[in-house]
Amino acid sequence: MARQKTKTRKTKTDPNAMWGGRYSLGPAAIMERINASIDFDRRLYAQDIQGSMAHADMLVAQGILTAKDGRDIRRGLRQIRAEIEGGKFKFSTRLEDIHFNVEARLTALIGPAGGRLHTARSRNDQVALDVRLWARDAIDRLDAMLQDLQAALIDRAEEYAATIMPGFTHLQTAQPITFGHHLLAYVEMVGRDRGRLGDCRARMNESPLGAAALAGSPHPIDPRKTAKALGFDRPMANSLDAVSDRDYVVEFLAAASLCAVHLSRLAEEIVIWCSAPFRFIALSDAFTTGSSIMPQKRNPDAAELVRGKVGRIVGAFVALCTIMKGLPLTYGKDMQEDKEPLFDATDALELCVAAMAGMMRDLEANPERMRAVAAADYSVATDLADWLVRELGLPFRQAHHVTGTLVARAAAKGVDLDKLSLGEMQAVEPRITRAVYRVLTVEASVAARRSLGGTAPANVARAVKEARRRFLGRGR
Ligand code: ARG
C-alpha cells in the first residue's frame, strides 16, 4: 500500500503571534490542525466575552488597569460580539482557539489595551470559566425544556386520568392501570432528571477565574469580584483544582445520559403503542413519516430517533470519563477534547426533549382498544385473589392457588374469568358468592387501587394537581 505523503510544513510561516516570542518557526501544518479548536470552541464566544468583561472590570476596580483601558476593552468586546453574531468575524485557525481569536481582534480594534486584558489570567482559567458558563446556560435551558415536557405529560395525564390500559411487567399483561398514571410515572422520572441537573449546577457554580495558569496571580486581583459579577456563589478555593477540574462536564453528561435513558424508554413505548398489533395511540402526520415503498406506512421516526440518540449522549459521558482518567494535575491539552462531546450531547438532548414534548402533545389515545387489551389475558386475576383474602379470609398464598385453578378452567373453556358460572367457581372454592363478580371488571380493578401512589382514577386526578404544584409551581 502506498504510503500517503503528509505535509509537514516547517519553515513557511511565522511563529504564533500570541506566544511565539521564543519561537523562530511557525507550526507544521499538521500541528496547526491537531492543535486548533476554533472550529468548535467558537460556540463559547458569548461566554468568553462575558468572562473577559468581568475580568476587565475587576482589573480596573483593583487599579491594575486604567478606567480608560477598561472602557476601550468593553467597547471592543461589544463590537467583536456584534461582528460574530452578524457573521462578519473572521475566525483564524492560526490563532488556535476562541480566546486568541477574540484577543487578537480586540488588540487590532483598540491597540495595546487589548493585550493588557490578559493580565492575571491564563487561557487555562479562561477556558475553565467559559465551559462552566456554557454548561450552566445549558442546564438552565434544559431545565425549562424538561419542565415543558412535564407540563405536556401532566396535561395528557389529566385528560386520560380514567382511561384504562394494560399495565405490563416483562411486557406481559399484568394488571389494568390508567393511562394517566402511566404518563405521571414519566413526570417523576423527569423530575429527578431536573433535580440531578440542579445538583450539578449548584456544585459547579464556583468561579475558576484568578487561578491564572495554575498557581494563582502575583497581581492584587479580587476573584470574589469576578465570581459575583458572573453569578457564581464563590471563587474556587484551590487554583490547581480550578484549572484542572472538569467534574461539572462529567456530572452534566451523567445527568444528561440518565435523562436520555428515560426519554428512550418513553420513546420505545411510543413505538410499541403505535404499532399495528397494539394500536394504543396514534401520532399525527406532524410526528410520523411515510415509507418510500410502502404507501400505508406511518413510521414513528421521531420516537425512534429519541431512542437512538441516547447512544451519542452516553458516548459523550464515556468520552469525558476517558479523557479525564489518569490526567495529572493540572491543565492538559487533552481537556480541549471536552467540548465536542459536551456540545453534541447537549444539542442531542435538547432535540430529544423538544421532540418528546411535541409527541406528548400530538398523540391521541385509543381508549376502546386499550381497554379491550387491558381486559384480556386474565388481568383481573389478582383482584379475584384479593377478594378471596378480604372476604373469605384465605391466606394470600392459598387465594393465589385457587385463582390459578380458576384461570386454568376459564382458559380451558376459552372465556374470561367473569364468564365462569358461580357453580364452576364454587366447585373450586365453595364459599365464593355472587359478590365476586363485582371485582372482576377492569374498572373495578383500577378504582380499587387507591393506595398511596396507586393507579385509581381518583388518585390520578389528585396526583395531577400535586404534580402541577411540585413541578410547575402553580395551581392547587
Ligand atoms: N483551547 C484550549 C482548550 O480548549 C484553551 C486552553 C489552552 N491552554 C493552554 N495552555 N494551551 O482547552
Image: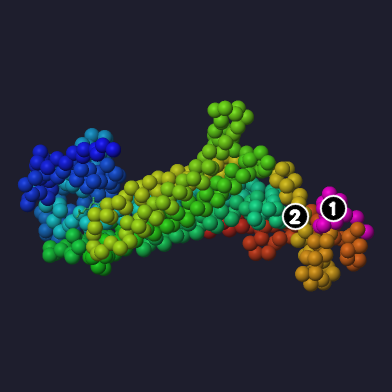
Look at the image and tell me whether residue 37 can be seen.
Answer: yes
Is 369 displayed left or right of 440 in the figure? left
Q: Residue at x 62, y 44 (%)?
A: 272
Looking at this view, is 475 or 459 the one in front? Answer: 459
> Which quadrant: the N terminus?
top left
Give the image location of residue 53, x and y in percent: 21, 51
Give the image location of residue 221, x and y in percent: 16, 62
The residue type indicated by label 1 comes to Ala
Q: Where does label 2 land, which residue?
A: 379
Give the image location of residue 200, x and y in percent: 39, 60
Looking at this view, is 337 or 451 the one in front? Answer: 337
Give the image location of residue 446, x and y in percent: 72, 56
Looking at this view, is 9 or 427 the one in front? Answer: 9
The residue type indicated by label 2 comes to Ser
Q: Residue at x 76, y 61 (%)?
A: 382
Task: State which region is magenta.
Answer: 407-423
Viewer-side label of 2, 1 = 1
Residue 291: quarter of image = top right
Question: Mark number for residue 291?
Answer: none
Is 331 displayed left or right of 410 in the figure? left
Nearer the N terminus, badge 2 or badge 1? Answer: 2
Q: Residue at x 66, y 54 (%)?
A: 168
Cβ atoms at labels 2 and 1 below 8 Å apart: no
Q: Residue furthest front?
A: 1
Q: Where does label 1 land, which residue?
A: 412
